Amino acid sequence: MSIRVGIVGISGFGGGEAMRLIAGHPSFELVYAAGEGSAGSRLVDRFPGVPAKLAELVIEKWDPATLPKLDVLFASLPTGTSAEALVRVPKDVKIIDIGGDHRYVEGWAYGLADVWPAQIEGQTRVANPGCFPAATLTALAPLLANKLIESENIIIDAKTGISGAGRGGADNRFGYAESNENLAPYGLLKHTHMPEMTKTIERLSGGSAAALVFTPHLVPMTRGVLVTIYCRGRASTEQCLDAARTFYAGRAFVRVTDKPPQTKWATGSNFAFVSYAADPERNLVIAMGVVDNLGKGAAGHAVQNANLIFGIPETAGLDGVPVWP
Ligand SMILES: NC(=O)C1=CN([C@@H]2O[C@H](COP(=O)(O)OP(=O)(O)OC[C@H]3O[C@@H](n4cnc5c(N)ncnc54)[C@H](OP(=O)(O)O)[C@@H]3O)[C@@H](O)[C@H]2O)C=CC1
Ligand SMILES: CC(=O)N[C@@H](CCC(=O)OP(=O)(O)O)C(=O)O
């Protein structure tokens, strides 16, 4: 089966990673690439290592009115810029929105693929989770589903690589001189990922997550997200690990580890690594989650969601071993 695929935002970090994964996918054929400033260039001009079969594909100016025949479109546009245009994509073209415009929006499934794959199968509009929610919710889901922690009083301390901010435009503030040897918290109290995390924690637990605290930090590495999540609960470490092993039994992309996970374990892959440390005496559960922000945090998760939509093996195009070191 050949599934005709398009990517808008292909010159960006998320779109470029989607291109890399789709180029190696056994059932996907990339037939359309679009953007804004990059329009007119060939893929080989932007990505010198692109496979020969894709080298001459020319990036078109993004316009939903001029799409060729497509089965699925991956949209990797800056959050805030895709909602209006994606409405104009024909209904028979399935869409995975890697950006943040359609999370918990009516008519769109929230694509938390490892946690609720059955809710994504057969959908036509899927909103990919943000990179921090992908790591956080994957780590918390087994604890919430088994009532091992309270949904209230969850504190998420997160670290992200610089590529999480995208290549950016003219006002890019993430250059080498500003980011190297630097650590910076940002988005305090009101980060854009708060609503989707709050809603999903409430959906998984049935309780309130109104008091959620989330503080991301920018660290000088290229890829990777680590979340360290402090929760209230009387479970032991073994109970948490067992709950996660059972919850993710048979699932391809979540690895439950005894050791605290590290960002490098996930680089270049669609894996999420989760682990736990808990002290029932102190009513304390620490959950940890690691993803590659461009893998499970964006393009890997998007391809997994597309596989679920089309009913092909969930691991198709995603079975590469992470890059190490
Ligand atoms: N980076 C990450 O780790 C993650 C990113 N995301 C989300 O994915 C989306 C893309 O992010 P990212 O790849 O990092 O961003 P980049 O800044 O790297 O890329 C943005 C892309 O959008 C294109 N673009 C911008 N404006 C327009 C426009 N008006 N019309 C058509 N194309 C346009 C750019 O094309 P051109 O160069 O041609 O102008 C570029 O290809 C965002 O919503 C982001 O929040 C989600 C999870 C993780
Ligand atoms: C370092 C950095 O800036 N990271 C981004 C997360 C990228 C992401 O997941 O973005 P969307 O939710 O917009 O898709 C941020 O904190 O907003």
Image (cartoon, rainbow, N blue to C red):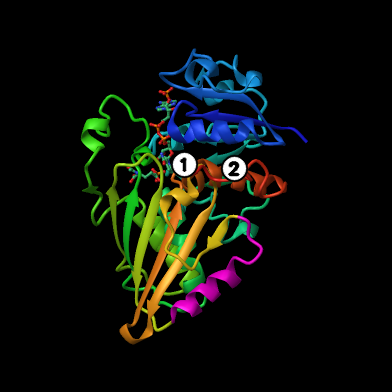
Task: Compare residues 303 and 235 and report the one nearer the observer.
Answer: 235
Instruction: Tell me where the magenta segment starts and ends, as one range.
Output: 236-252
Query: In the figure, residue 4 lies in which quadrant?
Result: top right
Q: Is mark 1 within 8 Å of ligand 1?
A: yes
Task: Compare residues 207 and 264 and report the one nearer the observer.
Answer: 264
Percent coordinates x, y for residue 280 in the rendering? 38, 84
Q: Mark 1 or mark 2, which has the lower sequence index? A: 1
Whether residue 150 is visible: no
The answer to whether residue 259 is above or below residue 84 is below
Query: In the figure, residue 316 lies in which quadrant?
Result: top right
The answer to whether residue 148 is above or below residue 189 is below
Percent coordinates x, y for residue 324 in the rendering? 49, 44
Secondary structure beneath disc 1? loop
Would you say the magenta stretch is mainly helix, strand or loop? helix
**What's the amino acid at mark 1?**
Leu
Task: Compare residues 289 and 121 and report the one nearer the observer.
Answer: 289
Q: Is residue 178 magenta?
A: no
What residue does disc 1 label? 294
